[in-house]
Amino acid sequence: MAEQSVRWGILATGGIAAAFAADLVDLPDAEIAAVASRRRESAEAFAERFGARRAYGDWESLAADEDVDVVYVATPHSAHRAAAGLCLRAGRNVLCEKPFTLNLREAEELVALAREHGRFLMEAMWMYCNPLVRRLKALVADGAIGEVRTVQADFGIAGPFPATHRLRDPALGGGALLDLGVYPVAFAQLLLGEPDGITASAVLSPEGVDLQTGALLSWESGALAALHCSITGGTANTASVTGTRGRIDVPSGFFHPERFVLHREGRDPEEFTADPADGPRTSMRHEALEVMRALRAGEKESPLVPLEGTLAVMRTMDAVRERVGVRYPGDAAPVGV
């Protein structure tokens, strides 16, 4: 693809779509070409707000729009499989919000569709594209703290949420794990890969979704990860990685950090901070830039957010749900699939 503006389509018009669109507007080589919602009024209002040239009152029209280079799927995650699949079948490249899908089966179906149609596909795991997280990963890979022994990470938000809220609706993939736990799991697997053992425990709501979940992941190397997520209380939202020769502590908001501290034996603590030029910590511009880089390079997936890594995280979350007894209506394979 030539060095020209990448034309984005935005599928859905909720809060995460608006946040992403606001970051796209600030990129000189990105253009919001079209937006789609199931309500045309919502699409038109969104288009006017962010300068999109076309607004559609259905998903199919956006998927069929050949003047769109890539579609950002920002629906609730229970609709990711349908929305992203529609776009891939129509020949669009796709950036799909996390959690990628409700379960591994749906994720595998999307990956197979992307490969069948020769399209680019990436999960919007913005944490993996964050420059400071990339620096942390590089330090660990270079042996700055020795061999990793433990990873600890938590993500919890204060409730309570009423029974009618999407976070407590099994049909919408409710619960703490998929919405919040995906970050601690993805952080641990970014550093250690897919675990060899998984144990978990959870407190379930009357509807059958997890209000809080704790998981212990283990690797044959001897490494362990202690992870926690909750929709019943605001946790510290921190992470820590301990190795045989040191430790890295990431303060609150570990998935979009402003800084982290490297502790090594015999040395003063070293603080690594975000470059102000990279934008605010809540910016999703880095994942957008990675998508545009990959498209221009003709790549079908991102080395920063590889599809096998996305499938591995989904395998882990499926295993955690199986152990704690959380099932969604979409877990059963559709007839004929």
Image (spheres, rainbow, N blue to C red):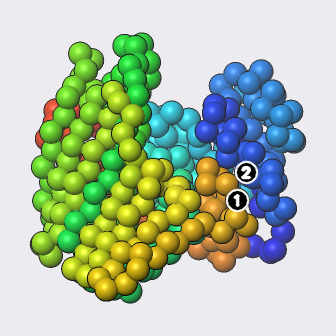
Image label count: 2
Q: Quadrant of residue 103?
A: top left
Q: Residues within 10 Å of mark 2 (few under 14, many from 20)?
A: some
- Badge 2 is on which residue? 23
Residue at image location 59% in from the left, 44% down from the top? 73
Secondary structure of residue under mark 2:
helix
* Residue 160 at x, y percent in the picture: 38, 19
In depth, the one of 148 and 52 nearer the eye is 148
* Residue 40 at x, y percent in the picture: 75, 23
Marks 1 and 2 sit apart, C-alpha to C-alpha, by 10 Å
Q: Are marks 1 and 2 in contact (CB under 8 Å)?
A: yes
* Residue 251 at x, y percent in the picture: 44, 56
Residue at image location 86% in from the left, 33% down from the top? 48
In depth, the one of 211 and 248 nearer the eye is 248
Q: Is residue 224 above or below residue 238?
A: below
What is the quadrant of the N terminus in the image?
bottom right
The answer to whether residue 308 is left or right of residue 199 is right
What is the quadrant of the C terminus in the image?
top left
Confirm whether residue 247 shows in the render.
Answer: yes
Q: Is residue 156 above or below residue 258?
A: above
Residue at image location 84% in from the left, 62% down from the top? 28
* Residue 145 at x, y percent in the picture: 31, 80
Secondary structure of residue under mark 1:
loop
In depth, the one of 112 and 316 nearer the eye is 316
* Image disc number at residue 322: none
Q: Amino acid at mark 2?
A: Asp
The answer to whether residue 170 is left or right of residue 280 is left
- Badge 1 is on which residue? 279
